[in-house]
Amino acid sequence: MAQAQQNPTRMELTRLKKKLVTARRGHKLLKDKRDELMRRFLALVRENRELRERVEEGISSCNRNFVLARASMSRESMNVALMAPKQEVYLETDTQNVMSVEIPKFSFRTRTQNKDDIYSYGYAFTSADLDGAVKSIADILPDMLRLAECEKACQLLAAEIEKTRRRVNALEHVMIPQTEESIRYISMKLDENERSSQVRLMKVKDMMLESAHHYKEKLETE
């Protein structure tokens, strides 16, 4: 048992009491961290669902427009129209610390701020459906990047929540009970030793009084 391995001394008792205070404080902090992580995780899950619906709707709209454009244009005309993109997109990455979890942050910038620079072709020989397809891709790009952020953040937060949960359970069900049991065991042993010492002292005192009494009687008889 764990108690048999404990050294029943007052120094060990003081050390275990300090350890128990630290464990309880750490347990509270980890529970607060777990609850805050859960709150942020659920908020991200809701946002992720809304973003995914918008992105899937935008991609579906883009595919429909491309199909319609392909029906009204020849393959060669579409290939020539999309051969040389006019706009350039630069992706920038960063991280954000959320409760000791490094979450990725994505941002982008374009070569020019003109919204019409997404069309790399003239309007005379192309279909309006192709314009709608290109516009749909440009419109859903910010949502796609945010969706990527949310999905990765949900994965990282879920892993951190699980790790924190295991630590909370280890403190709550293993470390704190074992430390409390060890403190009770050492306190009991110290009390038992103290009672034994008091009994021995009382016996020694009685022996000394009895010896002194016999010595006094011996002097009186002489």
Image (cartoon, grey):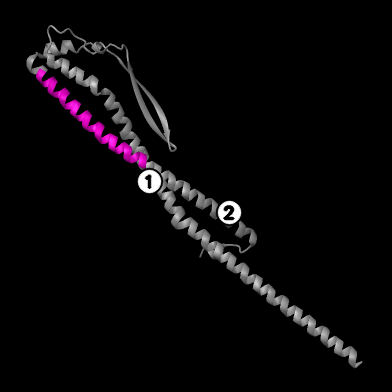
Q: Nearer the viewer, residue 10 or 41?
A: 41
Question: Disc 1 marks which amino acid?
Answer: Glu
Q: Residue furthest bottom?
A: 221
Residue 142 numbered tag: none
Magenta stretch: dominant secondary structure: helix
First in sequence: mark 2 vs mark 1: 2
Q: Position of residue 15 (x, y in %)?
A: 60, 55
Does the image show residue 85?
A: no
Residue at left offset 72%, top offset 80%: 203
Residue at left offset 69%, top offset 74%: 198
The image quadrant that residue 99 belongs to is: top left
Q: For this view, does 145 lie left or right of residue 171?
A: left
- Between the residue at mark 2 and the residue at mark 1, the CA separation in whole angstroms equals 28 Å
Bounds of the magenta segment: 39-68
Q: Position of residue 43 (x, y in %)?
A: 32, 38
Pointer 2 residue: 18
Residue at left offset 76%, top offset 79%: 205
Residue 162 numbered tag: 1
Q: Nearer the viewer, residue 143 or 6?
A: 143
Q: Judging from the image, what secondary structure is the residue with disc 2 in?
A: helix
Q: For this view, does 210 lie left or right of residue 194?
A: right
Q: Is residue 142 magenta?
A: no
Q: Position of residue 107 (x, y in %)?
A: 35, 23
Does the image show residue 126?
A: yes
Q: Position of residue 94 (x, y in %)?
A: 40, 26
